[in-house]
Image: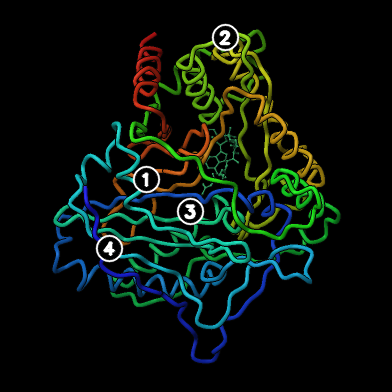
Amino acid sequence: MTTHIIEVARVTPATDSDSVLNSLKIPLTFFDLPWLLFSPVKRVFFYKLTESTREHFPSFILPKLKLSLSLVLRNYLPLAGRITWDPNEPKPSIVVSPNDAVSVTIAQTEADFSLLSGYGQRPLSELYNLLPELPVCDDSATVLSLQITLFPNHGFSIGVVTHHAVLDGKTSSTFIKAWAHLCKQHLENNGTSSLPEILAPSYDRSLINGVTGVDEKMIAMLRSLKGDPTNSSRSLTPFPAKTLGDDVVLATLVLSRDDVEKLRERAQRESTTPSHLHLSTFVVSFAYAWTCFVKARGGSDERSVSLLFVGDVRHRLDPPLPATYFGNCVFPAGSYDHEAAELSRFVAAVEILSGLVKGLSSREIETVAEAYAEAFRFVEGSTQFGTVAGSTRLKVYESDFGWGRPVKVDIVSIDQGEAIAMAERREQSGGVEIGMCLKKTEMDIVLSIFNNGLQN
Ligand SMILES: CC(C)(COP(=O)(O)OP(=O)(O)OC[C@H]1O[C@@H](n2cnc3c(N)ncnc32)[C@H](O)[C@@H]1OP(=O)(O)O)[C@@H](O)C(=O)NCCC(=O)NCCSC(=O)CC(=O)O
């Protein structure tokens, strides 16, 4: 279905009358660096709003969205900038110069709003029409691009594309909620442009900057992944993106609170060490979804399968970082090279994930480079390497710009790996939404195994 681009706007951060300069330079930390060459995170937020007509949208909705974006960028200034790597600096930085702006593509589409914002199988290519490019070249990488797309008389979507070396899931979701908060305030004529503490980012990097020697290891690891024998490249061009066929679909699978409870009971019944298990919603849901996926792929029982997730370690560090710390603060936790036969067993996956979550709090911050290096070592040899994008903690459905909560939020960039997207369930606390992106034939098999398995 055709999507027309109407305008590509540049939204600059609002300036206070007493500060004219909007410039900034923030070096990336060793938590940011592992993501430097990875393809961006792409999310689409869908808002249902029958008043979003061809007239009302440009005259009322869009100006409110742009104004509040400009206001929120004052607090989230790095998002208006780009990553660069000065030849005289040991590592890249986020640089913001006066007049830098966030690019906002405004588009209109006749695509089917209910289909695209639903839970069923949706063509990946149609979701891509709702997402802008994130320009990147050897010496400069844009941090954030947005696209606001009108579905006349149905609603609109906001496509958010972020550079993962600047924002992790917590920072990205807090930014959207902060933008939404200011937009809602303006709609309600509360004209305020100040953010509540939980939505205002903290840029204090003193704790992280005090750890030495890890940056160099991260940079060497990235260069070796890029096959740079001289260990000297400063290129910011990402690893090549996977090209996918027209037969790839994205679907959202749902576990209700009852389903999660049943999975918890099943894990307790089947485990020989039930009292040691960390049976959170995250653990049982990821274990269940991943084992369905491994079963659906079939093949040899001995083929190598791995899984990996990242934990937000803001509150796990000693001393902890503020929950609003801006940047990446995630630590990888993975278990690699298992036989497919083992990782098709729900209880085995639960036991592995449970151990990984429990171990996160005792991981030493200085070992983060080795943890990433170990994960990357197993990517090649694994026939399936399961990762998680998003989280059951980000509360993405709270992003209300004043016209109600989103009817749906999808992470589209899971198409680039065998990632599973996770979010809290929109309709009910305690459940979970799981996004998967696969060829239609394989998706049909996964859905059948997933749904049948819940009947037992
Ligand atoms: C490591 C984890 C995945 C493990 O999750 P778990 O749920 O198993 O473990 P946990 O210790 O956090 O929580 C266990 C139980 O404590 C309670 N609990 C703990 N923290 C809570 C919180 N903040 N809000 C509500 N409940 C909470 C819950 O009852 C939960 O069980 P119950 O859940 O059953 O009620 C998580 O702690 C975590 O760090 N999540 C964030 C990961 C993240 O940021 N990912 C984004 C990656 S970046 C990315 O992907 C890009 C992007 O998103 O843009």
Q: Quadrant of residue 357?
A: top right
- What is the CA distance from the residue labelled 4 to the residue labelled 1? 22 Å
Q: Amino acid at mark 4?
A: Ile
On whether ligand 1 comes within 8 Å of the CB at mark 1, the answer is no
Q: For the C terminus, which image quadrant?
A: top left
Q: Where is mark 3, residue-wise?
A: 173
Q: Nearer the viewer, residue 241 or 352?
A: 241
- What is the CA distance from the residue labelled 2 to the residue labelled 4? 47 Å
Q: Quadrant of residue 249?
A: top left
- Nearer the N terminus, badge 2 or badge 4? 4
- What is the CA distance from the residue labelled 3 to the residue labelled 4? 26 Å
Give the side of residue 90 with respect to residue 161, left or right: right
How crowded pointer 2 is (Cα within 10 Å; few <14, some 14-19, many 20+) is rated as: few
Q: Where is mark 1, residue-wise?
A: 409
Q: Amino acid at mark 1?
A: Val
- What is the CA distance from the residue labelled 2 to the residue labelled 1? 35 Å
Q: Confirm whether residue 432 shows in the render.
A: no
- Nearer the N terminus, badge 2 or badge 3? 3
- Nearer the N terminus, badge 3 or badge 4? 4
Residue 10 vertical position relative to residue 309 in the rendered view, above or below = below
Question: Looking at the image, is mark 2 or mark 3 nearer the viewer?
Answer: 2
Q: Where is mark 2, residue-wise?
A: 300
- What is the CA distance from the residue labelled 1 to the residue labelled 3? 11 Å
Question: Residue 176: image x %, image y %?
Answer: 44, 59
Residue 118 vertical position relative to residue 100 in the rendered view, above or below = above
Disc 3, SS: helix
How crowded pointer 4 is (Cα within 10 Å; few <14, some 14-19, many 20+) is rated as: some
Q: Amino acid at mark 2?
A: Ser
